[in-house]
Image (tube, helix red, strand yellow):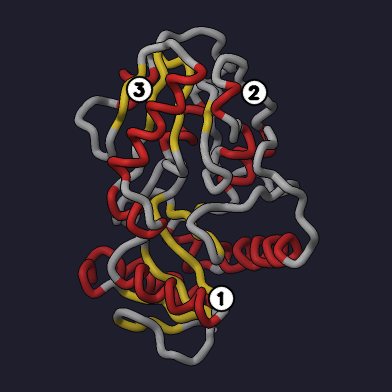
Amino acid sequence: MLWCCIEPERVWKTAPIMEALAAGFGGRTCLGEPPDDGEMFIVWGQMWTALSAIQKARAQGRPYLQLDNGFVRPGRGGLDGYYRISYCAPGPIMWSGAPRARLSITMQPWRASGSQVIIGVPGEHFGRAWGLDMTAWTAQCVRTLRQYCKRPVVTRVKRSPVPLQLELRNAWAVYTHSSNIAVDAAIAGIPVFCAETCPAAPVGCLDVAQIEQPVMPDRAAWINSLIAQQYTVDEMRSGLARDYVGAVIERADACRFSPRPDTSTRRP
């Protein structure tokens, strides 16, 4: 059974989505944190109820799902567009062999030019969920880049008034933690440097020392994997999201309980 948590701070925004999930998963809705019964639950985003409920779930070893705006064509609280669902983490797994993408995404060729590096600064609430001070994190990013790169550095904050495509137009690379800007950049053919938890990590690089020699792998399986982990409200209600999320959980659990190599310096 799945508890679908309606966010008290945003009832109007989250209730229709959680009700669709409850219908598709055979679950129940609740207002705020789920009952303390050990059942899996799903919460919105990374603040309010999510902060306290996820912290408790991790301490108890309780499974949970996290819902947020989609990687591409995000719903942003409306009934149109897509919403991501991730399992026991704020980001997706790499699902090799995922079902064929339900929407078409035009991938631009990898870019071999550009004058500046864009630092995509995650939002304050993301930082709080990860125990990060985003001001200090950004300053450290600039210092690290300066060790390996002479290119101009531009910091882009969440909800910047400057259109993203305008800043990406002259970008050599994007450097971020786990921000969705990395997905936009990879689709646009701009190399990405990021944390392992970033949704673009499978086609990016974890080592900023490689900033002048970025990796440019094939992206077909990666974008297919992302699309398979985001859903419309209708797909939540129909049960398609339940089936896909179930497949993701099986793969994530198999990886979690298998020996994992040291990936601290690997390049995907």
How far from the left and from the top, in percent, is residue 145? 45, 23
Residue at the image position 64 percent from the left and 68 percent from the top:
246
Q: Which residue does the numbered mark 1 point to in the structure image?
A: 63
Q: Is the residue marked by circle 2 packed among few (<14), some (14-19), or many (20+) residues within 10 Å?
A: some
The C terminus, quarter of image: top right
Q: In 3D space, how far apart are the residues under numbered discs 1 and 2 (Cα atoms)?
A: 34 Å
Q: Return the disc, 1 or 2, that comes first in the chain's sequence.
A: 1
Q: Return the disc, 2 or 3, that comes first in the chain's sequence.
A: 3
Residue 49: mark: none
How far from the left and from the top, in percent, is residue 198? 52, 44
Q: In 3D space, how far apart are the residues under numbered discs 1 and 3 (Cα atoms)?
A: 37 Å
How far from the left and from the top, in percent, is residue 109? 58, 16
- In-image side of 239 versus 265 (left or right): left
Q: Which residue does the numbered mark 3 point to in the structure image?
A: 165
Q: In 3D space, how far apart are the residues under numbered discs 2 and 3 (Cα atoms)?
A: 21 Å
- In-image side of 214 versus 159 (left or right): right
How far from the left and from the top, in percent, is residue 127? 35, 52
Question: What amino acid is labelled 2 in the image?
Answer: Val
